[in-house]
Image (spheres, rainbow, N blue to C red):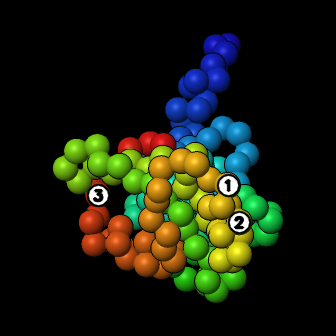
Amino acid sequence: MRRVTKSEVLKAVSNYGPIRLVGFSDEPTLYRMILPQRGDVYVKCGADILLNGLKTDLRAEARCPVCGNVTSFHIDQRRIEDLDPKEPMLHVVEFKMGPRHLGVECESTHIFDKKDCLTKWVSTYAGKHGLVISLPEYMSSLNQRLPRKVSPA
């Protein structure tokens, strides 16, 4: 009987059907997707959830890096639904990797459940200045750009 290596398992898990998941993490993170017929999958940052939502419907939970509260939502047909709480914010640092090829800097890209948490985090943040935007607005922006290739974080 042949033994399966960890890298073979990770490669199999990071591919979901005909699509490759963006930002897959083999360790639990603040960002969890619940995929139909696959279950829980962790990704490296909040934008990774939305980027994956361009390719498949999913449920998601994002834990605020400041207070630990959970933001939950669904992405159905590339639209955010059932957002709870109603007004979480995303801080995202994007970079272009070529025509229609988007990358995000995950260390600087988080979903905050409320504005106070975002403000507190930004007050001590020393990295690249990112875009602060609501989740539905960012998803709409991604839909308008519709990247064909998305860089793994």
Q: Position of residue 59 (x, y in %)?
A: 61, 69
Q: Are marks 1 and 2 in contact (CB under 8 Å)?
A: yes
Quadrant in the picture for the N terminus: top right
Q: Are marks 1 and 3 in contact (CB under 8 Å)?
A: no
User: Where on the picture, by quarter, is residue 113?
Assistant: bottom right
Disc assigned to residue 120 = 2
User: Where on the picture, by quarter, is residue 8?
Assistant: top right
Camera-side residue of 76 and 49: 49
Q: Residue at x 64, y 13 (%)?
A: 2
Tag 3 residue: 147
Marks 3/2: CA distance?
32 Å
**Label 2: element kind:** helix
Disc assigned to residue 124 = 1
Amino acid type assigned to the residue bearing label 3 in the image: Pro
Q: Residue at x 55, y 68 (%)?
A: 90
Q: Position of residue 83 (x, y in %)?
A: 62, 82
Mark 3 residue crowding within 10 angstroms, few (<14) / some (14–19) / many (20+): some
Q: Earlier in the sequence, mark 3 or mark 2?
A: 2
104 versus 37 height, above or below: above
Q: Position of residue 35 (x, y in %)?
A: 59, 60
Marks 1/2: CA distance?
7 Å
Q: Residue at x 48, y 64 (%)?
A: 50
Mark 1 residue crowding within 10 angstroms, few (<14) / some (14–19) / many (20+): few
Amino acid type assigned to the residue bearing label 1 in the image: Thr
Q: Is residue 14 visible?
A: yes
Mark 2 residue crowding within 10 angstroms, few (<14) / some (14–19) / many (20+): few
Q: Earlier in the sequence, mark 1 or mark 3?
A: 1
User: Where on the picture, by quarter, is residue 146?
Assistant: bottom left
